[in-house]
Structure formats: C-alpha cells, structure tokens
Image (cartoon, rainbow, N blue to C red):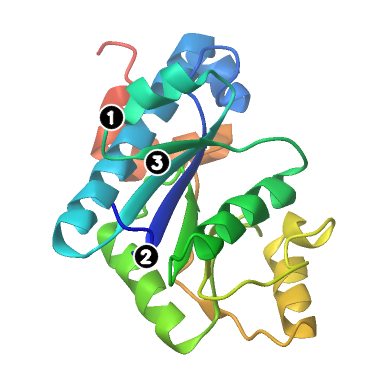
Amino acid sequence: MPDYLPRLILFSRLPLAGRAKTRLAPALGAGGAAQLQDRVARRLAGRMEGLAERLPLELELCYTGGKREQAQAWLGAGFACREQGGGHLGARMARALERALKQGAPKAVLVGSDLPGLDQAILEQALAALERSPLALGPSLDGGYYLVGQSRPAPGLLEAPHWQSLAALSARAKALGLEPALLPPLRDLDTPGDLAYWRENDPQVRSWTDPAS
C-alpha cells in the first residue's frame, strides 16, 4: 500500500497469558485476561479494516511483548507489523508516529487496543480534525488519552514526563505552539472497575467474560 496514505496505528501488547492485561488477571485469570484483550483488540481491528474499505488508509500493528511471527499471525495481512522497540511508552509512541510521517503519510493516528468504545466515527473524527489542526488527542476518563494523531512532526511532544497524562501532554503541546483538537472522551478497559463498567454497558464484553460461556 502506498506510503502517502493516512496511517492508522494500533499500538498493542500481544495477547499472551501472563503478559497482557495483568491487572485483570485476579478477576479473569491470566488466560482470561489475555483472551479478553484479544477479543477487544480484534473487534477494534475489524472496525479499522471496515473504515479502510471506505477510505484510503494504511493500517499498522505496532506491537510489543512477543515475536514478529506471532504479531503477523494475530490480526492478519490487513495490518503491516512493526515492533515498538525500546524506551518508555512516550518514546515508543513518538517513534511510530514519526516513522509514519517520515514515510510520507499525510496523517498518522495512533490508538491503544483496550478501547471497547472506539468506533469508526471517532476514527473519522480524528482524521478530519487533522485537516485543521496538527495534533488530535482523545481523552480517556482516567486522565490519560487513548489516541494521538499528528499531521506534522512534533519533536519533543512525547518526551518524559509529558506523555504520562492528558493534562501534561496538552500543556507540552501548547508550549510547542500546537493547539490540539480534542475528540470525545472514552473509557478504556484496564482495571477491575473498567471491567465492571464494560460488562454492564457492552453485551459482547459481558458475554466474553461470562464464566458460563
């Protein structure tokens, strides 16, 4: 796929038991926590693929926590696979976004994989926001962020400690002369409290985590 297409980046740990969603392991077991991550991420990947059927997009899985062969087998041929590499989370995200822009993508949108509420409409909003702003951010209800989108490089944006919260990242952006476009806030799926919320509000998450299923 040509490199000049906008790039959607799914930024994820591979769903391996004992490595994925460890904060949910007390409730679901190590295998159950990894399986839930797998299902939520696959559903999001499907939404991304559906959007790519309507819009000219390139899809990338930027992974950690496993081998390249495992990453390639996980989501299939629709996603180019690239390893996150070393460094703190902000450095790894910055590297993925910078690579996309350097390779010619006019826009790069990076999202986490633990987002039951992230749909095609919000992804489209992010792409549209990058027409009028060089930076798009998706706020998480826990004070973090679930999406970072860029239409031009922003060196230093995701340096430590600025990447660690939405407030710190927004302040850093403004210090760099960037006014971020904000997307609708979402709740991720990371803690037992998140699990309880999504079991109540998402029938698929409820069925995936039902002990009887």
The residue beneath circle 1 is: 76
Q: How many marks?
A: 3
Badge 1 amino acid: Gly
SS assignment at label 1: loop
Mark pair 2, 3: CA separation: 30 Å
Location of residue 162 (image quadrant): bottom right
Above or below residue 178? Residue 199 is above
Name the residue located 46 percent from the left edge and 61 percent from the top edge: 109
Residue 193 numbered tag: none
Above or below residue 60? Residue 5 is below
The residue beneath circle 2 is: 6
Residue 117 in sight in this render: yes
Measured as percent of width and height from the top left, residue 94 is found at 66, 56
Of label 1 and label 3, which has the lower sequence position?
A: 1
Measured as percent of width and height from the top left, residue 48 is found at 28, 51
Instruction: From the viewer's side, name the closer residue of 192 and 184.
Output: 184
Badge 3 amino acid: Trp
Of label 2 and label 3, which has the lower sequence position?
A: 2
Badge 2 amino acid: Pro
Location of residue 126 (image quadrant): bottom left
Name the residue located 34 percent from the left edge and 12 percent from the top edge: 211
The residue beneath circle 3 is: 198
